[in-house]
Image: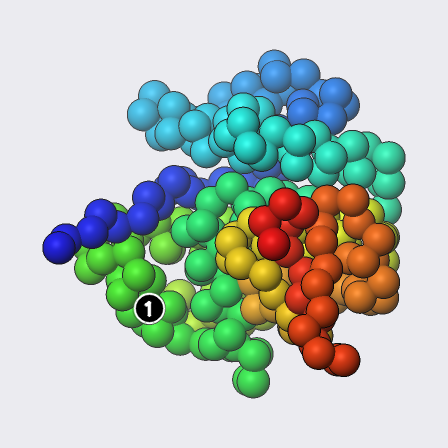
Amino acid sequence: MMTQAPRIGFDRFIAPEWATTALKVRAGMARLEDLETLLNAAGLGIAARTKTRTVLNRLWLEPRIELMDYADRGAAIFKAHPDVPVAAVNWGMAVATYPFFGKVAELIGRLSALQGDCASAEIHRRMSEAYGEREGTYRMTNMVIQSQAGWGAVTRAEKGKRVSRLPPAVVENDEITVWLIEAVLRYTAKPLAISTLQSQPVLFPFNLTRPLAYLVSNSEHLAVRSEGASNQFVALRGTM
């Protein structure tokens, strides 16, 4: 039986200032008109602008109903803690909202783990295995990589043939740390061993410095279960 390829969703290049302004609108720190001004200045065509707004709407302005509380909490953390890396907030929301974005991030994180970089062709090959070998998959994968480069996670070298990690941003805030872990759980849709949280490939642009086992154990949005003396798993509360 044939199965439908997963939806891509994140199908445009999203500049960091667009995502951050949409976040600020969600947090009550900017007006929708501020975002419109940025998009006007970018000189996007009518179709491109419409598609860009669709991505930004799902990302921050009009998230899916099951992500509304998550988006509100992320925006509140950003508003209350100016020292939190804005890229971490945008990244967490993108991972939770768009599995396609998360899959690209996961692949880059895995493939670049040893040497710090990887071949773009390998990313495209694996994305095609998951989403189908079609022109759209290739083009949208490029859009996500370009966006992740704009957000300060990677650089592209050799005319785009290689993708290299940039030094990770240090995350020292407890609230955003737990919020990012929740993003990974929403992306993977399964419990994760607490021992693996520090090295989750999808969060490769960030160095989580806080005590993760303690934080997830005390989160009202996460649940922890033990399997044996030293094997603990975390999941979204209500899914275990």
Q: Residue furthest front?
A: 228
Which residue is at 13% across, 55% downward?
1
**Residue ID at (22%, 57%):** 132
Residue at screen point 53% across, 58% down: 190
Q: From the viewer's perspective, is 142 left or right of 227?
A: left
Quadrant of the image containing the C terminus: bottom right
Quickly name the residue at label 1. 126
Say whether residue 193 is left or right of residue 28.
left
Q: Is residue 208 visible?
A: yes
Q: Position of residue 185 (x, y in %)?
A: 59, 54
- Residue in the foreground of this view, choosing between 155 and 223: 223
Q: Give above or below for 69 relative to 109.
A: above
Q: Secondary structure at mark 1?
A: helix
Please indicate, yes or no, whether residue 169 appears anywhere in the rendered image: no
Question: Relative to 138, does residue 119 appear above or below in the rendering?
Answer: below
Camera-side residue of 155 and 123: 123
| Vertical relation: 35 (above or below) 81 | above
Residue nearest the observer in this picture, 76 or 47: 76
Image check: 230 left or right of 20?
Answer: right
